[in-house]
């Protein structure tokens, strides 16, 4: 993997991490609301889980392969 590809992945990781943090804040605010929309809350949580998995996949791409 070349430097440009690594930088692209790092930028994508940062973008997804920001969205993940924003979703965390939105979920907390919605959970604290007395009239919380449970369907919206469930969708936000699913999106957050998707982002967590995507971040994990991208971070693992940055780990160099070592031949045993």
Image (tube, rainbow, N blue to C red):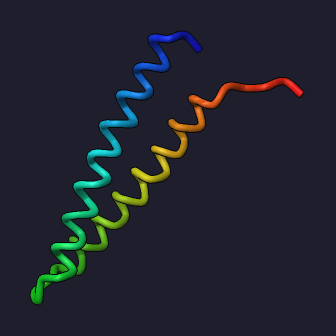
Q: In the rendered image, which quarter is residue 1 located in? A: top right
Give left or right: position of 67 versus 34: right
Q: Which residue is found at the position 53% from the left and 37% from the top?
A: 59
List x then y, in percent, for residue 32.
Answer: 17, 82
Residue 16's place in the image compared with 20, above or below, is above
Label total for image: 0
**Which residue is found at the position 51% from the left and 36% from the top?**
58
Quarter location, residue 62: top right
Left or right of 17: which side holds 4?
right
Q: Residue furthest right?
A: 68
Q: Given the current orientation, which residue lies at the most extreme bottom position? A: 34
**With respect to residue 25, does 53 lie above or below?**
above
Q: For this rendering, which residue is in front, 66 or 58? A: 66
Relative placement, left or right, of 45 versus 62 is left
Residue 68 percent coordinates (x, y): 89, 28
Name the residue at 46% across, 45% down: 54
Percent of width and height locating residue 10 = 42, 28
Q: Position of residue 24 (x, y in %)?
A: 28, 63
**Which residue is at a point 42% across and 54% down the rendered structure image?**
50
Q: Quadrant of residue 34?
A: bottom left
Would you place residue 18 above or below residue 36 in this image?
Answer: above
């Amino acid at each position: 993997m070349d430097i440009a590809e690594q930088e692209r992945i790092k930028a994508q990781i940062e973008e997804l991490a920001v969205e993940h943090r924003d979703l965390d804040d939105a979920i907390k605010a919605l959970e604290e609301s007395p009239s919380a929309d449970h369907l919206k809350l469930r969708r936000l949580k699913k999106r957050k889980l998707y982002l967590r998995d995507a971040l994990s996949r991208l971070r693992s791409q940055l780990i160099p392969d070592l031949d045993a």
